[in-house]
Image (spheres, helix red, strand yellow):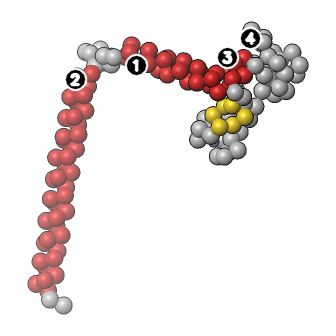
Amino acid sequence: MDTNFERYKYKKQMQLSSDMESLNAEYNKLVSQLGERYVELNYDKDGNFFAADVVKDIREMDERIALLNQQQYAFYGIRLCEECGAELSIDSSFCNKCGANQSELRKEVIYASGKCPKCGSLVKAGDAFCMACGKKFD
Ligand SMILES: [Zn+2]
Ligand SMILES: [Zn+2]
């Protein structure tokens, strides 16, 4: 074994790992600068996100759009799997494609389908229970 070469290799390795260490340190410094800038730009002095009200409105709008979408599908007796998006029959409690459990349908969705998801009886908007099987709509 050439000891000179071994020594060279060792030194080179040490050099590389120390270069890597300082690069990482610089990198982390930049990332934390980015974080500070972000906070400066986006939060007021009390730490409130400047667009919190708009974000809240958008979330509410997202929910309304999702509900409307569900009502449209329910009209055709269909619901979409909450996990994979597969089209399921409105009365499915789990997905026959991915197996995910489906949450209880909201009243508005059940009314849009016109049918009780449990027994298939006609459902009128405003009813809290299915008149045929007693299922509660929540
Ligand atoms: Zn699924
Ligand atoms: Zn029923």
Q: Which residue is mark 2?
A: 40
Q: Residue furthest top?
A: 126
Relative depth, front residue between 41 and 116:
116
Task: Give the image location of residue 90, x and y in percent.
Answer: 72, 30
Instruction: Give the residue displayed 64% in from the left and 27% down from the top.
Output: 73
Of mark 4 and mark 3, the one earlier in the sequence is 3
* Mark 3: secondary structure: helix
Q: Which residue is the site of mark 4?
A: 125
Q: CA distance from mark 4 to mark 3?
A: 8 Å
Instruction: Say which label, 4 or 1, has the lower sequence index.
Output: 1
Marked residue nearer the N-terminal end (1 or 2): 2
Looking at the image, which residue is at 85% across and 27% down? Answer: 119
Q: Secondary structure at mark 2?
A: helix
> What residue lies at 10% left-to-right and 84% top-to-bottom?
4
Label 3 vs 1, first from the N-terminus: 1
> Left or right of 102: which side holds 46?
left
* Residue at image mark 3: 108
